Every structure is written in structure tokens, then in C-alpha cells.
Image (cartoon, grey):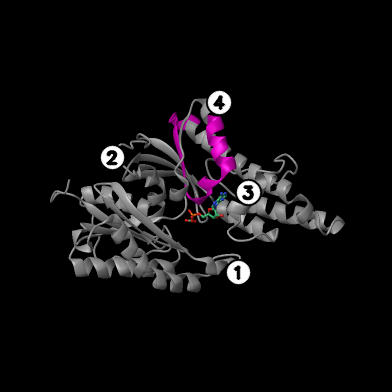
Amino acid sequence: METDKDIYILGIESSCDDTSAAVLKNGILLSNVTASQAVHEAYGGVVPELASRAHQQNIVPVVDQAIKRAGIEKEQLSAIAFTRGPGLMGSLLVGVNFAKGLSRSLGIPLIDVNHLHGHVLAHFIHESEDDHSNPPFPFICLLVSGGNSQIVKVNAYNDMQILGQTIDDAAGEAIDKCSKVMGLGYPGGPIIDRLARQGNPDAYQFAKPNIQGYDYSFSGLKTSFLYSLRDWIKDDPDFIEHHKEDLAASLERTIVDILMKKLRMAVKDTGIKHVAVAGGVSANNGLRNAFHDHARRYGWTVYIPKFSYTTDNAAMIGITGFFKYKDKDFCPIEAPAFARMEN
Ligand code: KG4
């Protein structure tokens, strides 16, 4: 039933290489449209200038489709939520300026969303009113993506405390770089995941970091992987081809072990046993299995998002925007994009 009080939020995400738009009605997702950029595959990583140009081409049709699929007119929108940062500046600017222009032309408020908060709140995306499958507050969230690896204590929608984070590479970045060293495609995460399913996770040992507290480090593992491969290739030039499944499985096992060790510490110390995972790497089957295994072994209640809401998407920006809308937490039109958290 339509009422004047219905809240329609348009979410816009453009922080890296996915242009995405979503529409939510009263916090329920109506549409989520994402255009991914294949142009980067040839370069083995995201090329910022190409990403920015592709966002410019995609933003109008993606937003148009999201509004059409939601079955509404843009004049019905209550507010526009957009990713303000962190991310690639050239990419962010496309979404940020589009959101500002549209909000000004429609005369509706703007809501700025932190991309990382969006990943965490992806657990509150509901596709129907009967879906209530979100974690209760407080919960612990392992946020693992191409740009971040964090353990977050989530006290409320708008109250998140970072307990630990990577001091160098992110988990996804380490996977992507090791995959590149193996001559596999980009992004490496899904390829490593697929190969790992057919390999032996105990075949090879790689360096694990020894870092205090809840912080992570993945640069030592990356170097250890590279140097080990160099040695093995000296004896067998086709080593990677002959052993790619075992290499992928052992790499994945090492990364999952590193991630879960610190997470176990955080759960033990806080006593919070509701544990969620978010971000692109949460699509990984080895990590998902480890979560289920910890649920059985340690009595955790685990929350694993649908595949479509693990990688960058506007539905998570829309739901974060919805909560901020209810708090009337709007942002001024001059609010600049930010590439890094400390800005
Ligand atoms: O969250 P996301 O889409 O982008 C960032 O905000 O960074 O995460 C992308 C990262 C990439 O490093 C990609 O390789 C990784 O998520 N990823 C995976 C899998 N799917 C995506 N890593 C491991 N296994 C997967 N199945």
C-alpha cells in the first residue's frame, strides 16, 4: 500500500570498479543494478583513470534501470544516499557529483555513506518484509575486501568500533597479488577459490605474521609466496601449472587461518558470539566453511551475506542511507569525497 510516509531511498556506489544503484522502500530492497568493469582484466588490477571513465558511461543507465526496476518515478524518491569514501578518488567523484546533481534537481536531501559501514550493514538488506535475518547488536564483523581487513565491533547502526585492522595489505589484495604472480586472471579471489576446492590445503606452508593485538598483516605472506614460487620454478619451470590447485588451496588456508585466529581472540575477549563476515572476500568458500566450523566448535551464531551483497553494491549503501534518513542525518551539498579514512 502506498502512503505519503513511504520512504524511498536511492543508493549510489562508485568507489572502485563497480557502478551500482539501488532503490529501497521503507528499508526493503526493490532493485539493485550493478555494472562491473571488464576493462581492468587485461591489466591485472583496477586502472583508476579507466575506472573513472567507465563510471561516467555507466552511471546514467544504471540509475535509470534501478529506478525503472523498482517500479517508481524519480520524483517519488525521498533522499539519495551515496558512497562518499573511502575509495578511488576519480571513481568516487562520479557517484558523488551525480548524487549531488540529482538531489539538487529533485529538491531532496543527500546522505553520505562510508563505504565500509555499508559493507557491515549489508547484513540488514532485506528483500521482503518477511526477511528478518540480521544480527542483533552488538555483534562482531570481520570486514575483508580488496582494500580493507578489519575486525569491527558493531554496537548500533551508527556506532562501530574498529578493534583491529591490517597494517599493510588487505586480505583480498594479498589474494589478488599472489594470483597475479601465478599468472592467473584478475580479480584473483574467485579464481583462487575455484582452484582451491580441488587442491590440498596442507601441501605447502607459507609465512604467517606475528602481530600484536587484533591487527593483521599480509605483506610477509605475499613475499613468502613469491620467494617460494621462485625456488620451486628453478627446479620445475612448469611448477605452477602442475601444482596450481595445491598452491591455491594452501594459500587460501593460510589466509583463512590468519583471519580466523584474530577473530577468535576478539570474540573471546569481548564475549560477543554473534559474528558476521562482510566484504568481497566473504564470498570465499574456505572462509565461509571456517565460519560454519567455528559456529559448531565454539557456539558462535554466524551471519554470512548473500553472494550478491558481498562485493561492492548499492543495496548496502541504500540500507545505510535508510538508517541515517530516519535519524535525519543528512549531508551538505559541499561535502567532499574522501579517498582515505583519516581525511
Ligand atoms: O568488497 P570488494 O568487492 O571491493 C572492495 O571494496 O575492495 O572486494 C573485492 C575483493 C577482491 O580482492 C577479490 O579478489 C575478492 O574480494 N574476492 C574473493 C572472492 N570473490 C571476491 N576473494 C576470495 N574468494 C572469493 N570467492
Q: Which residue is mark 4?
A: 297
Question: Could you tell me which quadrant the C terminus lies in?
Answer: bottom left
In the rendered image of this protein, does residue 264 appear above or below residue 196? above
Q: Determine if the C-beta at disc 3 is less than 8 A from ligand 1.
A: yes
Q: CA distance from mark 1 to mark 3?
A: 20 Å
Q: Nearer the viewer, mark 2 or mark 4?
A: 2
Please report whichever mark, 2 or 3, sits nearer to the chain's N-terminal start: 2
Mark 4 or mark 3: whose residue is earlier in sequence: 3
Nearer mark to the viewer, of 2 and 1: 2
Does 98 sit left or right of 300 as displayed? left
Q: CA distance from mark 4 to mark 3?
A: 26 Å
Residue at horizontal 49 percent and vertical 74 percent from the top? 49
The answer to whether mark 2 and mark 1 are in CB contact below 8 A is no
| Magenta segment boundaries in residue numbering | 268-294
Residue tagged 1: 42
Left/right of residue 182 with respect to residue 15 in the rendered view: right
Q: Is mark 4 within 8 Å of ligand 1?
A: no
Per the image, is 277 magenta?
yes
Q: Which residue is mark 3?
A: 194
CA neighbours of label 1 inside 10 A, class few (<14), some (14 to 19), many (20+): few
Q: Amino acid at mark 3?
A: Arg
